[in-house]
Image (tube, rainbow, N blue to C red):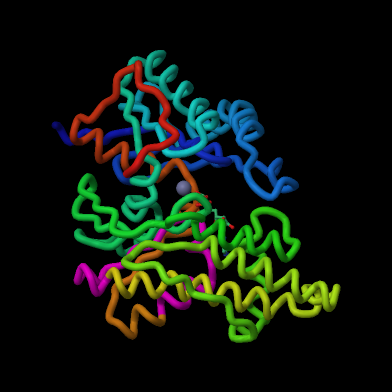
Amino acid sequence: MNNKPVYLLAIESSCDDTSCAVMCDRRKLSLTTAGQSVHQAYGGVVPELASRAHQQHIVPVVHQAIAQANIDKKDLSAIAFTRGPGLLGSLLVGTSFAKSLALGWNIPLIEVNHLQGHVLAHFIEDQTPREIPEFPFLAVTISGGHTQIIEVHSPFDFKVIGQTLDDAIGEAFDKSAKILGFDYPGGPLIDHWAQSGNPYAYNFPIPKVSGLDFSFSGLKTSILYFIKEQTTKNQYFIDQHRADLCASIQHTIVSILIKKIHAAVAQTGITQVAIGGGVSANSGVRNALKNEGSAAGWTTYIPPFEYCTDNAAMIGIVGYFKYLEGQFSAQNISAQARYPI
Ligand code: KG4
Ligand code: ZN
């Protein structure tokens, strides 16, 4: 392999964000993402609406990413795309588009596992220098679709040591928020209201799940029953106690997470903890990680928010590592809704 820079176009469309990035080696040259507000009224992502919106967004998003990168299409060395896991209809839009581009431009195609993207997002470079984890490290992926603790020994050597048995951590935030009457996604609103509330006002149960796995569905049920009981007695209960409720819910979810990170560090002896996924934006998670981390001697990494949520730069970084290894895909490759890391 010579040392010519690798220019790569990456496409992400696994859920409700249509995203395209242009990378030069590990460096992000541009990143354009179109979100989908159409789901707000439904309390969650509606798969059929998501795939239609991807179809509307993908051409302008790709055009804009190429224009902002200020490169010539002829310089591109390969196209990387998210093959899975995710919503099949959404994945199909990005997969078909990437395959067509690779065919039309006669350059290699590289399939990427979305979860690997979240883990390796720490290695994306941009104008702002920042510390990156050294191998091995513990990757903690926390989002609306995923909750995993992974031992990472190299860009291609992963061992999942803990994951959710039911809801993802972001779903725990969003479903609790829905019970309190917030629109989807309610996670950021819980975070907002929690700032002015008492985290010890209400006690919600911490699930007893052995090992490093998580469970969040019991928490959602206990919040639901608690709110039902209280609103029967006082119909204004939520309005009168919104901040305390949000602070207590957030405190419980964060405690569940931090407990498992402690257990993972104890089990593996690895003290580098790198978190990613949309829930890394949560102020409770950030503060707890910082405080617990410095008390326990962990080195913690949180990438900038644009690389925490679903984005194509994280697909591009995996694509780059695969390009260096010559790991290309054939044109008959198909999207895969279930795709373990
Ligand atoms: O990574 P992401 O954009 O998409 C998925 O792959 O799911 O994560 C979205 C999730 C949603 O559940 C959203 O409520 C949650 O991240 N989220 C937050 C915050 N910001 C985003 N949850 C709690 N507090 C926040 N500040
Ligand atoms: Zn994701």
Residue drawn at the location 42% of the way across and 71% of the way down: 208
Classify the position of the N terminus by image quarter.
top left
Q: Position of residue 332 (x, y in %)?
A: 35, 16
Nearer the observer, 6 or 49: 49
Residue drawn at the location 47% of the way across and 45% of the way down: 311
Q: Is residue 289 magenta?
A: yes
Q: Is residue 194 above or below residue 324?
A: below
**Can residue 125 be seen by looking at this rendering?**
no
Q: Residue furthest left?
A: 1
Total numbered labels placed on residues in the image? 0
Nearer the observer, 293 or 102: 293
Residue 195: quarter of image: bottom right
Q: Is residue 328 above or below residue 126?
A: above
The boundaries of the magenta stretch are 265-290
Q: Position of residue 232 (x, y in %)?
A: 82, 73
Helix, strand or loop: magenta stretch: helix
